[in-house]
Image (cartoon, rainbow, N blue to C red):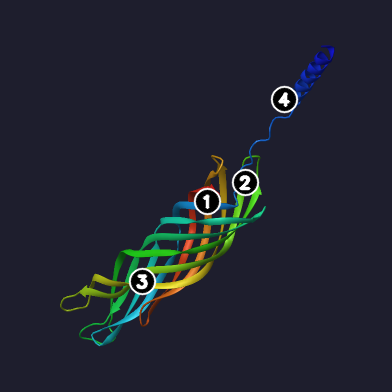
């Protein structure tokens, strides 16, 4: 009986010691997902996208009629979606597709030949509105995170960009005049959509905030730039800048 009591006491002491040890060292929490792959979705606006113009020549009354347009792009919407892959603790590589749309407006100036006299052009001016502008393409991102606090980081972005630009350009015009035909007024204009691909670059900054184990929201600022030469017709070309200053918000999902 004494031997049994001694063994029981030893077992109780061992169990108590094990319980105290487990209380002092709680179990390790489950490891968070590595988040090497992130789904990126952004929406926002492209502000101050730039301006461009046209210079071409029509033929009226058997003389040349030079036409000039001066156009500016309005603020438009931008949507982006893509993925990023973390290849190092301080570097991720991403591919983000984008689409943007806007309109161009401005003025048109033309010098229309007189129907009775040579070398006596009549100045015609007018406003242009609603010339459709679209951009789509891909940003190849190098993303470098910088820790700014215990919860927050700042991500620097940059890399090459590839653009496809579509822009409605003026190709013809109508006008009204009456005897003695010394003046004329602008009527309607005809336009066609010109399309061209081109390369460029982008730089940006992102401020993400963790909202769940695998999701973040982010504020995004980006400057993208590219240049394409669009041709509406022979002798009617225009150099158009793609991109601009972009601001928006986004979601990040880690896998």
Percent coordinates x, y for residue 211 in the rendering: 54, 40
User: Residue at the location (52% across, 51% down)?
Assistant: 220
Q: What distance separates the C-alpha of mark 3 from that of mark 2? A: 46 Å
Percent coordinates x, y for residue 57 in the rendering: 33, 81
Within-10-Å neighbours for mark 1: few <14, some 14–19, many 20+: many
Q: What distance separates the C-alpha of mark 4 from that of mark 2? A: 35 Å
Residues marked 1 and 2 touching at CB (< 8 Å): no
Percent coordinates x, y for residue 29 in the rendering: 65, 36
Mark toward the start of the polypeptide (3 vs 4): 4
Residue situated furthest front in the rendering? 1
User: Dot 3 corresponds to which residue?
Assistant: 69
User: Dot 1 corresponds to which residue?
Assistant: 220
User: Dot 2 corresponds to which residue?
Assistant: 153
Q: Nearer the viewer, mark 3 or mark 2?
A: 2
Within-10-Å neighbours for mark 2: few <14, some 14–19, many 20+: some
User: Dot 4 corresponds to which residue?
Assistant: 23
């Amino acid at each position: 009986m004494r031997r049994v009591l001694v063994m029981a006491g030893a077992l109780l002491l061992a169990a108590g010691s094990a319980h105290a040890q487990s209380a002092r060292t709680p179990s390790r929490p489950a490891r968070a997902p590595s988040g090497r792959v992130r789904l990126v979705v952004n929406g926002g606006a492209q502000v101050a996208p730039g301006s461009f113009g046209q210079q071409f020549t029509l033929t009226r009354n058997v003389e040349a009629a030079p036409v000039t347009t001066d156009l500016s792009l309005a603020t438009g919407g931008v949507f982006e979606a893509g993925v990023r892959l973390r290849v190092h603790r301080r570097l991720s590589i991403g591919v983000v597709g984008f689409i943007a749309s806007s309109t161009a407006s401005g003025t048109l100036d033309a010098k229309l030949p007189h129907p009775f006299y040579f070398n006596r052009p009549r100045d015609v001016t007018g406003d242009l509105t609603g010339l459709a502008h679209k951009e789509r393409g891909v940003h190849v991102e190098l993303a470098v995170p910088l820790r700014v606090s215990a919860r927050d980081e700042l991500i620097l972005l940059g890399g090459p960009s590839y653009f496809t630009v579509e822009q409605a350009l003026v190709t013809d015009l109508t006008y009204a005049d009456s005897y003695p035909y010394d003046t004329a007024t602008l009527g309607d204009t005809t336009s066609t959509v010109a399309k061209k691909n081109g390369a460029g670059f982008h730089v940006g900054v992102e401020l993400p905030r963790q909202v769940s184990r695998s999701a973040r929201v982010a504020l995004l600022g980006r400057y993208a730039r590219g240049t394409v030469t669009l041709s509406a017709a022979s002798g009617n070309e225009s150099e158009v800048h793609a991109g601009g200053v972009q601001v928006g918000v986004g979601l990040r999902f880690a896998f």
